[in-house]
Image: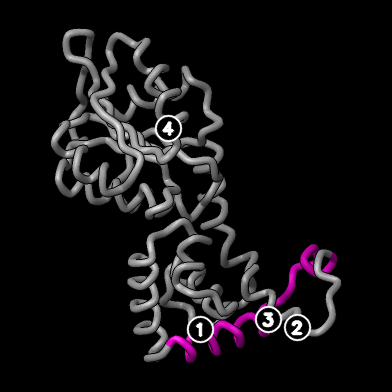
Amino acid sequence: MEQSRTFSHERPIRVFLLDDHEVVRRGIRDLLDGEGDIDVVGEAGTIDHALTRGPALRPDVAVLDVRLPDGDGISVCRELRSRMPGLACLMLTSFDDDDALLDAIMAGAAGYVLKQIKGSDLVAAIRTVASGQSMLDPATTTRLMNSLRGEEEDGGPQDERLAGLSPRERDVLTLIGDGLTNRQIAQRLFLSEKTVKNHISRMLAKLGVERRIQAAVIATEVARAAPVPARAVQDRREPAGRASHRAGG
């Protein structure tokens, strides 16, 4: 990924696909098969299959679905790149998710596009990341940058206890305050349960507490102290208990 690479009909881009929907994989394969400089060398429908087959096939680009029944494509990107540092991972998702984009960048993904992308644009994205360049969906990237720049301004005063937490750890804390289990948090954030457990361990250490219930108490206190946006007030014409529900919002 550090150096620019060139491909041709004689040396096509080797692509590996990971998506749990066979129809999606077949559609992408059919699309790419029509390109002379791209060769789909393999595919997988599960994370275990991807981690077993992927390295053996030595692809140049891995097109990975972000949301999978047995985990997430972002962890697959991280694992595959640890074995193949030159691999370019292109994350493909149905969701316009700021946190997933940030996690993808941290995992070393070279690109992140939505499944609504046109076929010709997907082909162009694969060629772009294969050449060693970055390809991130402009709308999603802009959304993330605006979120990061405006988080402190829009959120008002922040509880000092949360100062050391990452955005993802704050999300996990909020869901713990809502009473969700690790499995439910994993499903909500499109993560594996193992990743959620790791986030919780780091979060507890940063908060200076040892038990999950202590973190839940902090989450509830923070939610009650946080100002409610005007639009949220209009949308939530509910009786008592609004603050506890806000922890999940």
Tally of marks: 4
Which of these two is toward me, 70 or 226?
A: 70
* Residue indicated by mark 1: 160
Q: Amino acid at mark 4?
A: Glu
Question: Marks 3/1: CA distance?
Answer: 20 Å
Going from N to C along the chain, the mark reached first, 2 or 4, is: 4
**Residue at horizontal 45 percent and vertical 52 percent from the top:** 100
Circles 4 and 3, Cβ within 8 Å, touching? The answer is: no
Q: Quadrant of residue 232 in the image? A: bottom right
At label 1, counting other C-alpha atoms closer than 10 Å, the crowd grade (few under 14, some 14-19, many 20 or more) is few
Region of the chain picked out in magenta, as a range: 212-234
Which of these two is toward me, 95 or 233?
A: 95
Q: Position of residue 101 (x, y in %)?
A: 45, 48
As drawn, is 143 to the left or to the right of 210?
A: right
Q: Is residue 91 visible?
A: no
Going from N to C along the chain, the mark reached first, 1 or 4, is: 4
Residue 241: numbered disc? 2
* Residue indicated by mark 4: 22
Question: Marks 1/4: CA distance?
Answer: 47 Å
Q: Position of residue 150 (x, y in %)?
A: 59, 59
Circles 3 and 2, Cβ within 8 Å, touching? The answer is: yes
